[in-house]
Amino acid sequence: MVSVLKYLLSSQLKSPKEVQKNKGFTLIELLVAMILAVLVITPLLGFMINVLDTDRREQAKATSEQEIQTAIDYISRDLEQAIYVYDADGLTKNSGDTPQGIKNQIPPVKAATGCNDTTQCQPILVFWKRKLLEDAITVANSTAVDQVDDTFVYSLVAYYLINDNSSPWSKAARIARFEVSDGVQSLGGVTCGSDYPDEKYISGRCPNPGFKRFDLTLVGSNLREKMNRWTAASTAYTQQAHVLADFIDQTTNNAPLATCPTNTTDTTWSTVVPTSMTGFYACVETKKTLNTTVQVFLRGNALARIQNNSLGYSENNKTYFPSASARVEGRSYLFTR
């Protein structure tokens, strides 16, 4: 009996120590574990942040490259229908020159291009083109059902380089496209306002407000002089300019120079570029007969997608400024009959 009591007492005295021993970690053990965790996790966390940042930058580059190529392809297809492209003189000659440039005959006005400052909205590529209108004309048929046919009209197209930091656009520049088109005439049609009071058009196919056809009977020794005398109609423009591409390089200091092909005895290239901002510019081949060959240059700005400051171009970060170019010759023609 005495031995049993001794055993029970001894077990009771030992149990609190065992419970205390298995209760948890000591403070020193916790501190050691935390230090080891920091030493292991910190480099891994830094590595993951670096991987994510690198991926974000590469995605910005890839997106800019894709958008720049898409924009240059769109402009190229547009230019394929050009019948005349304005060179630098045709756009920006002073008001005292003869003939004058047409820069003051087209927007910018805020309603059309989104800005009203001529230093922030610069027309770069302005041209006349043939625009296809599908199912525009109803053709009377001897059968019970009349047929519809396609036709074309002339349009004046202007691509602007805009840099005004307005919401929701980026702090870089953007390209906007503006177009005004002629209507489809019909002997039994309707009148379309005061610009063409003696002409009739198919209902719903009136000329855009502000549109006025070029006049080849104007004074001038060649087509360039006649086209440079074009003036807008008396009615104000109501057409809107639509943004084609954002995140275009807006750098003015240390930006790559606008470089056009070398002039020869047979060919002269006119550089159309706004001041020293070369993110979007055009080289127009000038001829006395027709200006239809153009080389267009675009340069994007991927930095503007990933940061808010230090967005300018430099040799150290030029990989963030993808560029593309295309040479296009207008395949359309003037219908003068």
Image (tube, rainbow, N blue to C red):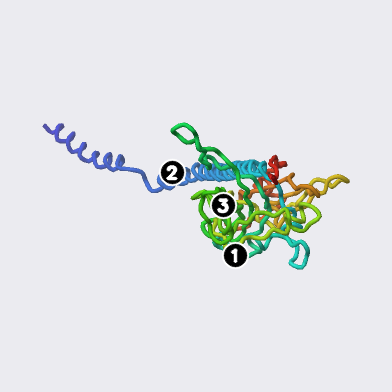
What kind of element bears circle 3?
Answer: strand
Count every numbered label the image shows and give the total: 3
Q: Which residue is mark 2?
A: 33
Who comes first in sequence, dot 3 or dot 1?
1
Residue 61 in view here: no
107 relative to 83 in the view: left or right: left
Which residue sits at x=57%, y=49%?
Answer: 185
Q: Tell me the kind of residue under disc 2.
A: Ala
Q: Nearer the viewer, mark 3 or mark 2?
A: 3
Residue 52 in view here: yes
Which residue sits at x=24%, y=39%?
Answer: 14
Occupied quadrant, residue 196: bottom right
Which residue sits at x=49%, y=33%?
Answer: 142
- Asked if marks 3 and 1 touch (Cβ < 8 Å), the reply is no
Q: Which residue is most to the right?
A: 265
How packed mark 2 is, by other alpha carbons closer than 10 Å (few <14, some 14-19, many 20 or more), is few
| Residue 296, percent from left and from top | 70, 46
What kind of element bears circle 2?
Answer: helix
Marks 2 and 1, how far apart at CA: 64 Å
Q: Which residue is mark 3?
A: 243
Q: Tell me the kind of residue under disc 3.
A: Val
Marks 3 and 1, how far apart at CA: 16 Å
Who comes first in sequence, dot 3 or dot 2?
2
Who comes first in sequence, dot 2 or dot 1?
2
Q: Which residue is mark 1?
A: 116
Q: Tell me the kind of residue under disc 1.
A: Asn
